[in-house]
Image (spheres, grey):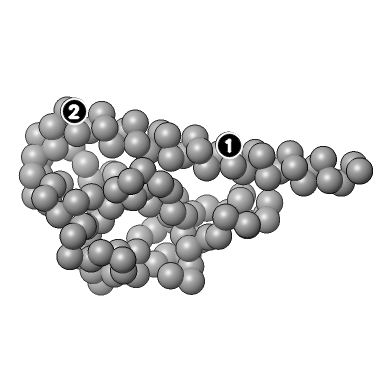
Amino acid sequence: MGSCLSAHSDEMTDMLPTAKVITIDGSLREYSVSTKVSEVLDEKPTASFLCCSDELYMDRAIPALGSHDWIELDQIYFILPRSMLDQPLEGKDMATLAVKASLALAGALEKRSNRTSGKRGEEHQ
């Protein structure tokens, strides 16, 4: 998983487009290059699957990306438990995913802001 950004990226890396993957526990992984789905799911490939947020629709089955597919920059993806595969997406599930994504993205912005303000503070000392 060498393409996953570390928590210690610099300001330039923070401005580059990334593929954003929201994990089952709500944490955010960012990938700076297109990456194979099998690499994103390398931890638990049989217990979970990856889907693109652009392919989620109410009352329709949740489609999984294939292990040989690639995630694209500037897209948001979810790692979901296999039990949700091909199940119709209900309103409460859509709301849960939206909240999970919002919290993960807000947390990432806050970390970036803290790193940036910390670096500026160090420059003025």
Badge 1 or badge 2: first in the primary sequence: 2
State whether residue 61 is above or below residue 41. above
Q: Quadrant of the N terminus?
A: bottom left
What's the residue at 61%, 51% (across, down)? 14
Of residues 65 and 22, the one nearer the viewer is 22
Left or right side of 67 for 100: right
Q: Which residue is mark 1?
A: 110
Image quarter of residue 50: bottom left
What's the residue at 63%, 57% (across, down)? 9
Query: Residue 6 at what x, y percent from top left?
Result: 55, 60
Can you tell which mark lies on residue 56? none
Residue type at mark 2? Lys
- For the image, the number of numbered tags is 2
Q: Secondary structure at mark 2?
A: helix
What's the residue at 52%, 42% (across, down)? 108
Left or right side of 86 for 68: right
What's the residue at 36%, 43% (across, down)? 26
Image quarter of residue 66: bottom left
The 10 Å Cα crowd at callout 1, few under 14, some 14 to 19, many 20 or more, is few
Of residues 67 and 7, the one nearer the viewer is 7
Left or right side of 125 for 53: left
Q: Which residue is mark 2?
A: 92
Considering every residue shown, the one lying at the far right of the view is 125
Q: Is residue 2 visible?
A: yes
Query: Residue 69 at what x, y percent from top left?
Result: 27, 67
Q: Secondary structure at mark 1?
A: helix
Residue type at mark 1? Glu
